Image (cartoon, grey):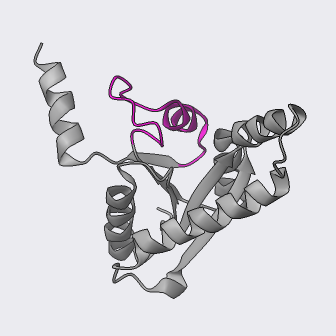
Amino acid sequence: MKKEERILVALGLGTYCQGVFDFAVKLAQGLDAHITVANIINDREIEAVRTVTDMGYNVDGDHYVSEAEAQRRAQLEKIMENSSFPREKINIVIRVGNPIDQLIRIINKEKIDIIVMGPKGRTDLEQVLLGSVAEKVFRRSPVTVISYRDREFAERLRKRGMV
């Protein structure tokens, strides 16, 4: 059996991202694996900025992307700052594009063995059990996908199953 050496942690910077990262660290420690932390700037956000620009407002799409990337990198660093996991075994990847396509590209390019995701992304809509990105990655991923659940989310799912 092949040893799992590379774990991709897809973080949408929503409610569950600290738990997702911490879970991936425990998994990586047990497997003696490296971690790639990925965040995708959805190209729909860029299109929205372009639409505002087309309406005559002075907004720079390239500036938006560089600012968004800097902010997200800072948020990711904050998530990782209290981790005992060796920093030299963590790689941060921030991409712009369709989140599903970009995550699949990262899986292939970085030779990822396992992907760890939260059940929901940035929207954290209560009625959504599995985010559309997570659902589509689950169907399209060439590697094992682990869907993280915190205790509160797991308990809500258990209660729904008791109906």
**Is 157 drawn above or below residue 37 in the view shown?**
above
Whether residue 29 is visible, yes or no, is yes
Q: Is residue 5 above or below residue 9?
A: below
Residue at left offset 59%, top offset 64%: 71
User: Residue 127: percent from the left, percent from the top?
Assistant: 34, 22
Q: Quadrant of residue 136?
A: top right
Query: Is 117 on the left-hand or right-hand side of 109?
Result: left
Q: Indicate the quadrant containing the C terminus: top left, top right, bottom left or bottom right.
A: top left
Nearest the eye: 17 or 130: 17
| Image spot of residue 120 (x, y percent) | 42, 38
Indicate yes or no whether the magenta region holds residue 64: no
Q: Which residues are magenta?
A: 119-143
Front residue of this view, candidates 67 and 157: 67
Q: Position of residue 135 (x, y in %)?
A: 50, 31
Secondary structure mainly formed by the magenta segment: loop
Q: Position of residue 97 (x, y in %)?
A: 74, 45
> Residue 35, can we see it?
no
Is 92 drawn above or below residue 53 in the view shown?
below
Q: Is residue 148 left or right of residue 155?
A: right
Residue at image coords 32%, 28%:
126
Q: Residue at x 38, y 72 (%)?
A: 31
At x 31% / y 69%, what residue is drawn?
Answer: 26
Q: Is residue 3 left or right of residue 60?
A: left
| Residue 99, quarter of picture | top right
Residue at the front extreme, as displayed: 57
Looking at the picture, tell me which residue is in the foreground, 36 or 61.
61
> Does the magenta segment cover residue 139?
yes
